[in-house]
Image: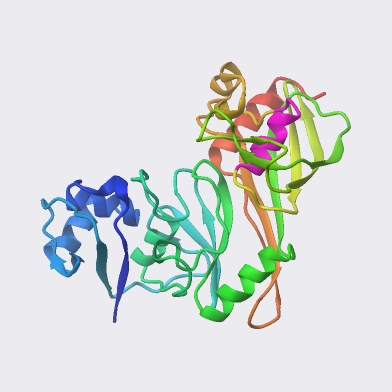
Amino acid sequence: MSERCSFPVPEGLVGERADAALARLLGISRTKAADLLDAGVATVNSQVLGKSDRLGDGILEVEISDAPGRDAEPSIPGGLTIIFEDEDLIVVDKPVGVAAHPSPGWTGPTVIGALAAGGLTLAAQGAAERQGIVHRLDVGTSGLMVVARSVDAYRGLKKAFKDRTVEKTYHALAQGHLDPTSGTIDAPIGRHPTADYRFAVTSEGRPSVTHYQVLEMMPSASLLEILLETGRTHQIRVHMSALRHPLVGDLTYGADPTLAARLGLSRQWLHAQRLAFTHPVTGRRVEVESPYPDDLDRALDVLRGEGAL
């Protein structure tokens, strides 16, 4: 059995050696990428690629053969773990450092690429480079993502996210101690007026609503449970920064770099911990949870070791 997967070559990979580019795009080792290229199963615009060729602009196609069987919670290329899977959708636990889909300038692994490398087909809906993607997590955010495999699931999940019926629960570590310890942030978010790579609370932004509850207070920080009504880019990070309680490790939005260094964090402490929704095809309830990754766990251990309040 084999599957042929195709996606546009990200702008950031144009001109890269084919073996290095394929490894980054699919989230596999360079050796495995070289093996695929040596087998002649990868093409760009129907031209067979060699491992030392330079990747050109166009449509990359790769034939994945004999995909191995998977256990209930398998690990697939790119470090993803499948939490739930059926013929209509997949829920994955995304590690930090993996993007949802290819984009200009991104040369690292993607959820779409890793699933393709694992022999999984996705819904042929949406933009070519985002097929099956119904919501996203930042590269620097770990946790749960649902991806559509069938057209019906894609349409149903897109509607569910639009109607705000999907329950998205995040855990986050914010600097300082929030007062009150629970609340709602209702503040529009748009592009930052002077920094294109950032977002900000702005009167011209899109409506954005975040609910938070303090789970635990520690020296220097508070562990929060956060529920999102909306799903704006960087929403939690922007809202917490606007409260002057940026997420620990989130240097883009004003976090203290010395605290991040002390905790050994190289990214924001933010994890998509729980996802719950009605299956768009079967109508059954799907509820999944994800444990904290090691780097986030270690940061909590350090803070707790300094003495709980």
Q: Residue at x 17, y 70 (%)?
A: 46
Compared to residue 270, the image places residue 79 above or below, namely: below
Q: Residue at x 43, y 52 (%)?
A: 79
Q: Nearer the viewer, residue 280 or 299?
A: 280
In the rendered image, residue 50 lying in the magenta stretch gets the answer no
Q: Residue at x 79, y 34 (%)?
A: 216
Location of residue 197 in the rendering, given as x and y in whole percent from the top left corner = 50, 35
Compared to residue 224, the image places residue 261 above or below, namely: above
Q: Residue at x 49, y 59 (%)?
A: 81
| Magenta segment boundaries in residue numbering | 234-245
From the viewer's perspective, tell me whether residue 3 is left or right of residue 309. left
Location of residue 173 in the rendering, given as x and y in whole percent from the top left corner = 68, 34
- The answer to which quarter of the image holds residue 217 is top right
From the viewer's perspective, tell me whether residue 207 is left or right of residue 193. right
- The answer to which quarter of the image holds residue 309 is top right
Q: Main secondary structure of the magenta part?
A: helix
Compared to residue 92, the image places residue 24 above or below, namely: above
